[in-house]
Each structure stands twice: as C-alpha cells, then as structure tokens.
Amino acid sequence: MTTTLITGANKGLGFETARQLLEAGHTVYLGSRDAERGRLAAAQLGARSIQLDITDDASVLAAAKAIEADGGLDVLINNAGVEERGAANAVIGPADVTADLMRETFETNVFGTVRVLHAFLPLLARSAAPVVVNLSSGLASLTRVAGIPAHVYPGVAYPASKTAVNMVTVQYAKAFPNMRINAVEPGFTKTDLNGNTGIQTVEQGAEIIVRMAQVGPDGPTGGYFDAEGTLPW
Ligand code: NAP
C-alpha cells in the first residue's frame, strides 16, 4: 500500500491529484492549511485530512509527526503554491514587483517546499520506494521564458520562485539517489491560482503529477517534465 501526502489539496490540481491517486489505490493524506476546508474536501474523496500550512514550522512538524505515527510516507507531492496577482487578475511585472511581493511568493513556493521536504525526508527515507513530486511551472524554464515576448507573460515573482523550485529539485535528487525526485509542469490549468483563466481542465493538468507520483525505482529522478516529456531548464 502506497501512502501519499499532497500539500494544498483542498482544491484545484491538488484535489484532482488526490482523486486520481485514490482511484489508483493510494492512501492519500489531503493537506490543507484550513482544517475545515481540508476536512470537507477529504470527506468528499474518502481521503485522510491533515492540517498543513507550509509556511508554518509548527504545522508542518505536527503533520509529519502524525503521519509518522500512523505508519509513514512513500510519496510527497509539494503542490501548495501561490501566484500573487494585482487588480483584475493582472500579472505583476517588473515595474510593480516589490521585495515584499517576492518574499511572500518565495515564502510559500520555495521556503514552504523546503520546509516540508526537511520535515518529511526522514519518513521518506524509511519507505521502500520514496517519491517526491515538486510542482514547478513551464514559466520556471529560463530557456522557454527568454523566448516569450514580455506582453505574453511579464511576471517576475512567480516564475523566479518556480525556477528556484527546479534547482531545489535537482539538488535534492542528487543528494538522495534512492528517491525519485522530479519537478513537473502541469500546463496552464483553469484554477483559482490564475483566476480560472487557464485553458486545461484539472483532469488534464493532474496527469503528469499523477504519473510522476507513480514512478518506480528505475524511473527518472532530478528531471523536469510536462505531459509531453522533458522540458528545457
Ligand atoms: P489553486 O487552485 O489556487 O490551489 C492552490 C492550493 O495551495 C490551495 O489548496 C491553497 O490553499 C494551497 N496553499 C496556498 N498557500 C498555502 C500554504 N501556505 N500552506 C498550504 N497550502 C497552501 O492552484 P493550482 O493551480 O491548483 O496550483 C497547484 C500548484 O500547481 C501550484 O504549485 C501552482 O504553482 C502549480 N501550477 C499551476 C498551474 C496552473 O495553470 N493552474 C500551472 C503550473 C503550475 P487555500 O485554498 O487555503 O488557499
């Protein structure tokens, strides 16, 4: 039996990933920073609910202790994320981005991801087939974004945070060769993150997350993938 934790799974891609992995037979801990929203979402799916605010040490440590006491963890999906936007859902570009906005975005997307990794690595180390999936973005790719005209996507904080997630992924993958640790780009998906402007459904977006959550011991590690294959860094 594979036990999986998904952070930020009370809605959006995390919720759909939970649904698909439950269907595949995983025992799923549905993480939510709001305990009640998490309880309702987990009840809807038949998942286990766990309060988990990835910006809060005490919350993350309590979640790790509870899951350890319940038997441990095989798969960690670092899904919780934010994209700070301005009025009318406008992406905040270089003229308006502030240090505070960068800090807020990194606090969740980067520091939160590392906080969760740090707390759950000891549990994963005891699994026979440990797997980590980090939610990156196509906007994390320096190669890709350098080729996108400024008016198509002017944002700074969000893509920079996801580029940092890619580096975190590579360095952890090298340090823990027994684990499969990969970054994924789900594609532009209709969720609250982007004011529901995405063009894919959550079912489509979750596909690569679910696939990389089920990668076997001989599967890739330290990679960056979307549904079509490997992405350029
Ligand atoms: P979403 O519907 O807005 O869901 C984001 C989830 O993260 C929510 O459950 C939210 O909880 C949670 N969250 C935010 N801050 C948190 C914190 N401090 N602690 C715990 N949970 C927190 O967005 P989504 O599109 O599904 O995004 C999921 C992941 O996919 C993100 O990492 C995002 O960057 C990535 N991604 C999305 C797209 C896309 O097009 N949608 C594309 C590429 C990558 P609340 O409900 O409490 O706010």
Image (cartoon, helix red, strand yellow):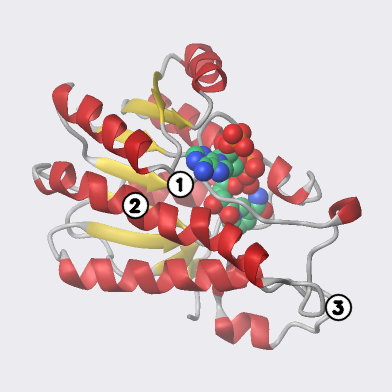
**Is disc 1 surrounded by few (<14), some (14 to 19) or many (20+) residues within 10 Å?**
many
Which residue appears at 69% of the width and 47% of the height?
Answer: 193
Which mark, residue 115? 2
**Is disc 2 surrounded by few (<14), some (14 to 19) or many (20+) residues within 10 Å?**
some
Choose between 213 and 107: the one closer to the eye: 107
- Can you name the residue that lies furthest to the right here? 88
Mark 1 CB in 8 Å range of ligand 1?
Answer: yes
Verify CB contact (< 8 Å) between mark 3 and mark 1.
no
Element carrying mark 2: helix
Which residue appears at 43% of the width and 52% of the height?
Answer: 112
Which mark, residue 55? 1
Which mark, residue 15? none
Left or right of 126 in this view: 32: right
* Residue 178 visible (yes or no): yes
**Is disc 3 surrounded by few (<14), some (14 to 19) or many (20+) residues within 10 Å?**
few
Q: Amino acid at mark 2?
A: Arg
Asked if 113 appears above or below 69 in the picture, the reply is: below
Left or right of 137 in this view: 225: left
Rendered-image quarter of ligand 1: top right
Element carrying mark 3: loop
Which residue appears at 62% of the width and 81% of the height?
Answer: 144
- Circle 3 sits on which residue? 151
- How far across and how far down the image is residue 156, in percent? 68, 74
- How far across and how far down the image is residue 72, in percent? 17, 32
Left or right of 132 in this view: 37: right
Choose between 115 and 70: the one closer to the eye: 115
Which callout, 3 or 1, points to the residue nearer the camera? 1
Residue 5, quarter of picture: top left
Q: Amino acid at mark 1?
A: Thr
Asked if 20 appears above or below 46 in the picture, the reply is: below
Verify CB contact (< 8 Å) between mark 1 and mark 2.
yes
